[in-house]
Amino acid sequence: MSPQERFAANLRQARIEMGISQEELGYRCELHRTEISLLERAGREPRLATIVKLAGALETTPAELCAGIAWQPSKRRFRHRPWLTTGPPLPPQGGFPVLRAPPPSPVLIARQGNS
């Protein structure tokens, strides 16, 4: 598993545990929902500022979002360390469980009411 894939799995797991949608997470950290989707599918490698924003919005730490990612200098490659991840592994792509949408946040309701 590449570092991007490990980060993607950690991000998705943290978001689901918070019970928020990709759109809500994007709003909380000033990113578009398509950016959240790309990050969760390992389609984009996040910048440090993005990792910090995501961690803040998910009430976790950047270290938790990067759990299980390590560099092996002697072998000049990344190593996946599953024992450092938080929680069970996610199902394979396309096999995600159906989740109920969380209730809309007061912020989104207020924003929609002002338009």
Image: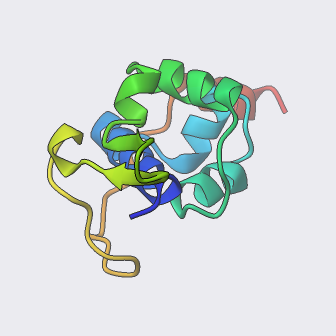
Of all residues, the one furthest to the front in this rendering is 74
Spot occupied by residue 15 in the image (x, y as percentages of width and height): 40, 41
Spot occupied by residue 4 in the image (x, y as percentages of width and height): 52, 54
Front residue (pair 87, 95): 87
Residue 90 picture quarter: bottom left
The residue located at (32%, 72%) in the rendering is: 96
Quarter of the picture containing the N terminus is: bottom left
Of all residues, the one furthest to the bottom in this rendering is 94
The correct choice, above or below, for 43 with respect to 27 in the image is: below
Residue 18 picture quarter: top left
Colour scheme employed for the rendering of this structure: rainbow
Spot occupied by residue 65 in the image (x, y as percentages of width and height): 41, 34
Front residue (pair 73, 78): 73
Q: Is residue 15 left or right of residue 92?
A: right
Q: Is residue 22 left or right of residue 34?
A: left
Front residue (pair 83, 23): 83
The correct choice, above or below, for 92 with respect to 86 in the image is: below
Residue 31 picture quarter: top right
Q: Is residue 86 left or right of residue 99?
A: left
Spot occupied by residue 5 in the image (x, y as percentages of width and height): 46, 59
Of all residues, the one furthest to the right in this rendering is 115
The correct choice, above or below, for 112 with respect to 3 in the image is: above
Looking at the image, how many numbered discs can be counted on the residues? Answer: 0
The residue located at (30%, 61%) in the rendering is: 99
